[in-house]
């Protein structure tokens, strides 16, 4: 598996297709994370931008290889493992961005509530911010796994489906990503840190099921 991960990482880096989503996330942070902004609000903002970026990175990683190269990798190690490696590299790339976002918010954010009256402990806030980012990241990976090859083989279907799903999961109250982000907003209003353990646990289950379903389908469509 290590060799597969190295191969997929080299493929992602070498094609430079990672640049657009990384630039998009950098612009997102530059626009919304400002010095003196309430730290919990900033964590929520940074995490929210990760969801569509994770979807994009997943699409890049699972479609990086030409069909012939994909078939060779599938023949060597099995289609499920080859596809899993691509998804894991997408998750790893998104995780790097999540950590960068958290560090930036810690450096620039104001550790107080929205009205600047209640102090917010930085370390628990950073942990909650990272957990929120992971929740959004994993939800994005789940969307990406289900809206690209091998589930949806046409970009004409996959791209609109992934964009629509990303938007809905950010705004719908039943979404774990929305619940985690809402917790950050509520916490910022009152100066309390609400770690999104339950939304994260739900997202882990959803992402694992989505990835497992996509990997299982690769053997039928390879």
Image (cartoon, helix red, strand yellow):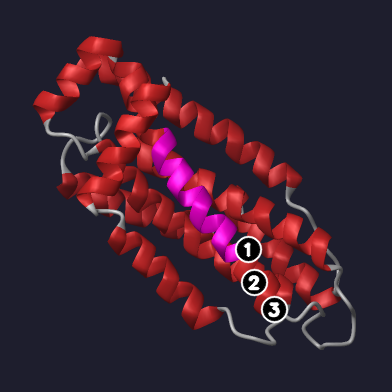
Q: Is residue 163 visible?
A: yes
Q: Position of residue 31 (x, y in %)?
A: 48, 82
Mark 2: give few (<14), some (14-19) or many (20+) Cα within 10 Å. many
Q: Which residue is mark 2?
A: 105
Rounded to the nearest angstrom, the CA distance separating label 1 from label 2 is: 5 Å
Q: Which residue is mark 3?
A: 109
Q: Residue at x 81, y 88 (%)?
A: 115
Mark 3: give few (<14), some (14-19) or many (20+) Cα within 10 Å. many
Q: Is residue 12 above or below residue 215?
A: below
Mark 1: give few (<14), some (14-19) or many (20+) Cα within 10 Å. many
Q: Position of residue 144 (x, y in %)?
A: 37, 43
In this image, 127 relative to 80: left or right? right
In the rendered structure, are the residues bearing label 1 and label 2 in contact, judged by CB atoms less than 8 Å apart?
yes
Q: Is residue 94 magenta?
A: yes
Quarter-of-image position of residue 220? top left
Element marked by disc 2: helix
Q: Disc number at residue 64? A: none
Q: Is residue 41 visible?
A: no
In this image, 30 relative to 70: left or right? right
Element marked by disc 3: loop
Q: Is residue 114 above or below residue 136?
A: below
Q: Position of residue 37 (x, y in %)?
A: 68, 84
Quarter-of-image position of residue 64? top left
Label whose residue precedes the other's in the sequence (3 or 1): 1
Q: Residue at x 26, y 14 (%)?
A: 219
Rounded to the nearest angstrom, the CA distance separating label 3 from label 1 is: 10 Å
In the rendered structure, are the residues bearing label 3 and label 2 in contact, judged by CB atoms less than 8 Å apart?
yes
Instruction: Identify the magenta region.
Output: 88-102
Q: Which residue is mark 1?
A: 102
């Amino acid at each position: 598996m290590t060799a597969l991960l190295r191969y997929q990482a080299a493929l992602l880096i070498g094609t430079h297709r990672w640049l657009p989503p990384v630039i998009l996330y950098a612009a997102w942070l530059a626009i919304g994370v400002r010095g003196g902004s309430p730290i919990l609000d900033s964590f929520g903002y940074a995490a929210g931008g990760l969801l569509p970026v994770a979807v994009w990175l997943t699409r890049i990683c699972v479609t990086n290889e030409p069909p012939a190269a994909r078939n060779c990798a599938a023949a060597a190690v099995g289609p499920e493992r080859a596809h899993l490696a691509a998804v894991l590299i997408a998750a790893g790339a998104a995780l790097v961005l999540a950590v960068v976002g958290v560090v930036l918010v810690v450096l620039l954010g104001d550790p107080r509530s929205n009205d600047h009256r209640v102090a917010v402990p930085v370390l628990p806030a950073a942990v909650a911010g990272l957990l929120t980012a992971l929740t959004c990241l994993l939800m994005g990976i789940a969307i990406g796994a289900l809206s690209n090859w091998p589930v949806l083989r046409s970009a004409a279907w996959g791209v609109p489906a992934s964009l629509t799903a990303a938007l809905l999961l950010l705004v719908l109250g039943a979404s774990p990503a929305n619940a985690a982000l809402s917790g950050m907003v509520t916490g910022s209003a009152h100066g309390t840190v609400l770690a999104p353990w339950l939304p994260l646990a739900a997202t882990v289950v959803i992402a694992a099921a989505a990835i497992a379903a996509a990997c299982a389908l690769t053997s039928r469509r390879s």
